[in-house]
Image (cartoon, rainbow, N blue to C red):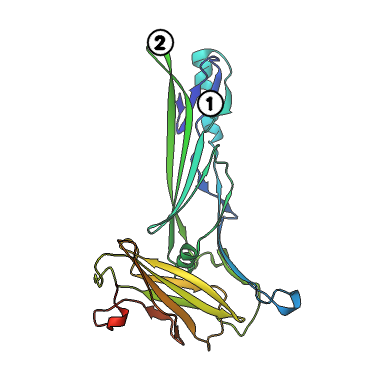
Amino acid sequence: MESGPLRAYQDKEKSCLWYLAPPPPKLKYVNEKPSYALEVFAYHGRKATGDRDKFWQKVILTLDFERAWPEEARKNLKKLIAKKYFCEAKFLSLPISQAKVKILFGDLTYAKTWDTRWRPQKIVIPLEDYLGALLWKAAQKGQVLLSLVIEEKAKGVRQEKGRTLPASLTWVWTLPLNMDRQKNPANFRLYDLGGRLERAYTQLDILCLDFVEETLPHLYATFVEIGFPVNGKILIKKVRFDENTPFRQQVIFPLAHELNRPYRYRVLRVFDDGTQKIGPWQEKKGEFALDITLYRNVKSSEEAP
């Protein structure tokens, strides 16, 4: 039975017991401001705390949602049930067997699954380095557009020709989320927990045209490892390129190394037959772009086996 957007399913034994379908989610607003946040947390150990060599960083995306059926729709549905079944309806939430939430950004996906109804709550997502870096970079330009996809499934029974048969229902909602840094600058925050003013924030653009230019036959994937010196420790980031990845990617360290010191990198190429070619560690200084393409005029010592 339906009342506007609200739909309910009758219990197979109790005619006045009804289960409400899950309401669509929507982004929560507080004081007319959207309730979301993109935050970068970075910590650099200190001598005073005994963890001088420690370094970590987290990029956190927080999305706050709400979901509820309009009270007017519930009242109207109760009137319809009372008119048809001559009783006062009792509403329960329809039991959900699975809820899946996906965050889509470009060709990247973050997904999480629950074995119950997805409650109206904050989604707090610790992002992988690549996705977090892309979101943070896009936020600086005011160009963050996410898609939230929520899918919920329920199991029940249905009547068919006097028989009771198992049945399943699925609901899918897609919400575009425009995260505008110019309109809501307070929703984008960077926390340098080390608080060292002599350090800067590093972004490294990596270019690999191995697959665009087809520089090597039977190449399966190209990896590059980048090592940044921080307090005497080399912090390694690893980036992968293949036929399905962009030829230009970025590495962002929210807390960076001293800019007057070089970073190190090496390239690993993997071929369809499983063989590998690992290049030597090399150094670069003062540049924020790294081209790891194996061009056709390379030296013979650098050619793939």
Pinpoint residue 108: horizontal percent, then vertical percent.
41, 57
Q: Looking at the picture, which amino acid does disc 2 mark?
A: Gly
Circle 1 packing at 10 Å, graded few (<14), some (14-19), many (20+), is some
Q: Nearer the viewer, residue 145 or 223?
A: 223
Residue 50 located left or right of residue 140: right
Residue found at x 31% / y 81%: 301
Q: Is residue 233 depicted above or below 30 in this figure? A: below
Quadrant assignment for the C terminus: bottom left
Q: Which mark is residue 162?
A: 2
Residue 161 located left or right of residue 297: right
Identify the residue at the far bottom of this view. 260
Residue found at x 46% / y 69%: 238
Residue 140 visible here? no
Q: Secondary structure at mark 1?
A: strand
Label 1 vs 2, first from the N-terminus = 1
Q: Quadrant of residue 164?
A: top left
